C-alpha cells in the first residue's frame, strides 16, 4: 500500500484529447469570416481533422520526443566518405509528414489556399513549432521560383505536394520535396548585400558554381535551397539542389549544427559551398527583389506562428486555472487570476485576428480582380508592422502563462518551458525588430499607397469606439512629421500595429473583448504587466471565450 503522504491531489489533468481548431473561438470565427461560403464546409472539415490530431496524446508525444532527441549531424560515413547528413528522431518525420499531408505547403494553387493554410499552420504549430520551419520555407519558395517559369514548372508540383518523402534522392524521383533558404553569412547578418559567396557562370544558360558559406541554413536535409550569392552582375538568387539530376550529391558541406535556445527539433546549420552547382533564379543583380516575396511569405508565417504559440500558452494557463484550487476555490474564479488570464487572452485574440486578416489578403491578391491592388498595398505595410509587434508580444505572453502554472509550469514535463524557449524565435527570424521597423519606414516613404490602404482598413471602424478614434488621431499626428523618424520608428510601428488590431477587434470580436482591448492598449487604462486591466470590465466573459474544450 502506498504511503499516505504519496496521495496526489489538486493536480491538473493534461490538456489532451481535444480539437485544437474547434476549441478556439477566435480562430474558428476568423476562418468563417474570411472564407468563401462555397469553401467553408470543406475548410472546416480539414481543419477539424487537423485540430483533433493536434490535440491527441500521440501528436503531443511526437512534439516532446522530437525536442528531447534533437537532430544529429553525420559529416562522414563509416568509411570516411563525406555525406553531410542530419539524422532526426522518428517523431520529427511523423510531425513533418502530417504537416505536408495537411497541405501546409500548398497555398498558391487552390481556392482560399492562404487562409486555409495559415489556419492549419496555426493549429499544427501548437503541437511543435520546429517542423514549421521547412514547411514555411517550402511554401514561401513558390513565388520566387515563379520568376523562372521553367524552374517553377519543374519544382512547384513537388513543393505543393501533400506527400512527404524524406531522404536524399534526385528530386525528380520524389513525389514531394521541401525547400530551405540560405541568406545570412558570418559577416553580414541582416545586411545581405554584404554577402561574399561568389557565383561563377558556366557555359550552360543559367548555371553557376558557388563558393562561400552560410551562417544560418535551416533544415539542411531539404531537397533544395534558395540562396543569395554575388554573380558578375551583382547579388543574385540561386536554386541549390542537395542532389543533382544524375544522382550525385551536390557540394553542400554541413560544418556544424547550431545549439539553439529553442526550436531544438529542427536542424539549423552552417554550410559551405565549394564549386556547388546552382541555377540562377531571376536576373543577375536582382537577388533581393527576387527573394523578397519569399521573405514576405515567411514573415507572415512568423506572425501566424507567434499567434499560435500565444494561443497554446493561454490555453494551457486557462486550463490549469480551471482545475487548480487555491484559497477556497478554483483559480479561474479568483478576481486577480481572472484579470491575468483575460489580459493574456486579449493579446492572443488580437494576434490571431490580425494574422488571419493578413492571410485573407493574400488570397485576394492571388485571385486578382477587384481589391487585389489595395490588398497588395495593405500587405506591404501591414506584414512588417504585424511581424514586429506580434512576434515581440509572444515572449511576455508565454512567460506570464508559465507563471500561471507556478512551479509546475517551470518543470519541463508541463510543456511550458518549450513554449517559452520557442517564443523569441519569430522575432529574430526573417529580420529582427529594427529590420521590421526600418522596412515599415521604407514603405511609408516610398509607397504612399501602402499607408493609404492601411488607413482605409483602420477607418472601417472609425466612430465605433472613442478610444480607438483617439489612437487613430495620435497615429496620424505621428505620421504627419517623419523628420528624425528612425529614432522613433519602434514607437510608430507599435502604434500602427495596435491601431490595426484595435480596429479589427472593434469590427469583429465580441463587445467585451473589443472594450477591454481598447481600454487597455489604446485608452491607456493599463499597467506595465499582465493582469492590470480595469476591474470594471467583463473579464469573466473574456476568459470564458479563451477556454479550450475539456475545461
Image (cartoon, rainbow, N blue to C red):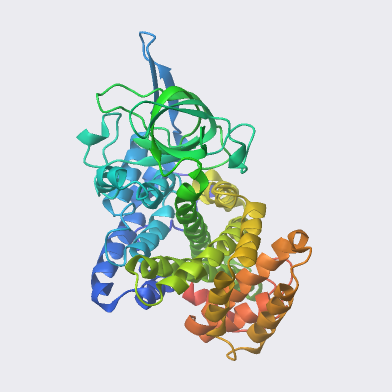
- The residue lying toward the viewer, choosing from 103 and 9, is 103
**Tally of numbered discs:** 0
Q: Quadrant of residue 123?
A: bottom left
Indicate the position of residue 290 as horizontal and vertical percent values: 45, 48
The reply to whether residue 292 is in sight is yes
- The residue lying toward the viewer, choosing from 529 and 236, is 236
Q: In this view, does 304 lie above or below 479?
A: above
Q: Residue at x 35, y 29 (%)?
A: 242
Q: Which residue is drawn at 28% across and 54% down?
A: 102
Q: Residue furthest top?
A: 79
Indicate the position of residue 27 as horizontal and vertical percent values: 42, 70
Q: In which quarter of the image is residue 244?
A: top left
Residue 97 relative to residue 494: left or right: left
Q: Which residue lies furthest to the bottom in this view?
A: 463
Q: Residue at x 26, y 35 (%)?
A: 171
The reply to whether residue 501 is in sight is no
Quadrant where the C terminus is found in the figure: bottom left
Q: In this view, does 540 lie above or below 436?
A: below
Quadrant where the N terminus is found in the figure: top left
Q: Residue at x 24, y 45 (%)?
A: 163
Q: Quadrant of residue 224?
A: top left
Residue 245 relative to residue 283: left or right: left
Indicate the position of residue 56 as horizontal and vertical percent values: 33, 54
Amino acid at each position: 500500500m502506498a504511503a499516505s503522504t504519496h496521495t496526489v491531489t489538486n493536480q491538473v489533468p493534461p490538456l489532451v484529447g481535444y480539437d485544437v481548431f474547434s476549441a478556439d473561438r477566435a480562430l474558428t470565427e476568423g476562418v468563417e469570416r474570411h472564407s468563401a461560403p462555397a469553401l467553408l464546409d470543406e475548410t472546416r472539415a480539414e481543419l477539424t481533422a487537423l485540430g483533433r490530431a493536434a490535440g491527441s496524446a500521440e501528436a503531443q508525444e511526437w512534439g516532446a520526443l522530437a525536442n528531447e532527441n534533437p537532430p544529429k549531424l553525420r559529416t562522414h560515413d563509416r568509411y570516411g566518405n563525406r555525406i553531410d547528413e542530419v539524422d532526426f528522431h522518428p517523431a520529427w518525420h511523423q510531425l513533418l509528414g502530417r504537416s505536408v499531408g495537411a497541405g501546409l505547403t500548398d497555398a498558391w494553387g487552390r481556392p482560399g489556399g492562404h487562409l486555409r493554410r495559415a489556419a492549419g499552420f496555426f493549429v499544427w504549430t501548437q503541437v511543435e513549432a520546429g517542423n514549421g520551419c521547412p514547411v514555411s520555407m517550402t511554401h514561401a519558395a513558390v513565388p520566387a521560383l515563379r520568376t523562372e517559369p521553367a524552374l517553377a514548372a519543374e519544382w512547384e508540383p513537388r513543393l505543393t505536394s501533400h506527400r512527404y518523402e524524406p531522404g536524399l534522392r534526385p528530386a525528380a524521383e520524389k513525389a514531394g520535396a521541401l525547400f530551405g533558404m540560405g541568406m545570412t553569412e558570418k559577416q553580414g547578418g541582416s545586411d545581405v548585400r554584404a554577402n561574399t559567396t561568389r557565383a561563377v557562370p558556366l557555359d550552360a544558360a543559367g548555371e553557376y558554381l558557388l563558393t562561400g558559406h552560410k551562417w544560418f541554413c535551416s533544415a539542411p536535409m531539404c531537397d533544395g535551397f534558395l540562396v543569395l550569392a554575388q554573380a558578375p552582375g551583382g547579388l543574385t538568387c540561386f536554386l541549390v539542389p542537395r542532389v543533382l539530376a544524375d544522382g550525385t550529391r551536390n557540394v553542400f558541406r554541413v560544418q556544424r549544427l547550431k545549439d539553439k535556445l529553442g526550436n531544438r527539433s529542427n536542424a539549423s546549420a552552417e554550410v559551405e559551398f565549394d564549386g556547388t552547382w546552382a541555377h540562377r533564379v531571376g536576373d543577375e543583380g536582382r537577388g533581393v527583389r527576387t527573394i523578397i516575396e519569399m521573405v514576405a511569405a515567411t514573415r507572415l508565417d512568423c506572425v501566424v506562428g507567434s499567434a499560435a504559440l500565444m494561443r497554446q500558452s493561454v490555453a494551457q494557463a486557462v486550463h490549469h486555472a480551471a482545475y487548480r484550487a487555491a484559497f477556497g476555490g478554483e483559480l479561474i474564479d479568483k478576481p486577480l487570476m481572472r484579470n491575468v488570464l483575460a489580459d493574456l487572452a486579449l493579446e492572443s485574440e488580437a494576434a490571431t485576428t490580425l494574422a488571419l486578416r493578413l492571410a485573407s489578403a493574400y488570397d485576394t491578391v492571388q485571385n486578382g480582380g477587384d481589391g487585389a491592388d489595395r490588398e497588395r498595398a495593405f500587405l506591404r505595410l501591414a506584414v512588417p508592422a504585424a511581424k514586429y509587434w506580434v512576434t515581440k508580444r509572444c515572449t511576455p505572453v508565454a512567460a506570464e502563462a508559465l507563471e500561471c502554472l507556478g512551479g509546475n509550469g517551470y518543470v519541463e514535463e508541463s510543456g511550458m518551458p518549450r513554449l517559452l524557449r520557442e517564443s523569441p524565435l519569430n522575432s529574430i527570424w526573417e529580420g529582427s525588430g529594427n529590420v521590421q521597423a526600418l522596412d515599415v519606414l521604407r514603405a511609408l516613404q516610398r509607397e504612399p499607397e501602402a499607408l493609404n490602404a492601411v488607413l482605409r482598413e483602420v477607418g472601417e471602424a472609425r466612430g465605433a469606439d472613442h478610444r480607438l478614434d483617439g489612437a487613430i488621431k495620435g497615429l496620424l499626428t505621428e505620421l504627419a512629421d517623419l523628420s528624425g523618424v528612425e529614432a522613433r520608428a519602434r514607437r510608430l510601428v507599435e502604434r500602427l500595429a495596435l491601431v490595426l488590431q484595435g480596429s479589427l477587434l472593434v469590427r469583429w470580436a465580441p463587445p467585451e473583448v473589443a472594450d477591454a482591448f481598447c481600454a487597455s492598449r489604446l485608452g491607456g487604462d493599463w499597467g506595465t504587466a499582465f493582469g492590470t486591466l480595469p476591474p470594471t470590465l467583463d473579464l469573466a466573459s473574456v476568459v470564458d471565450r479563451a477556454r479550450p474544450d475539456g475545461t
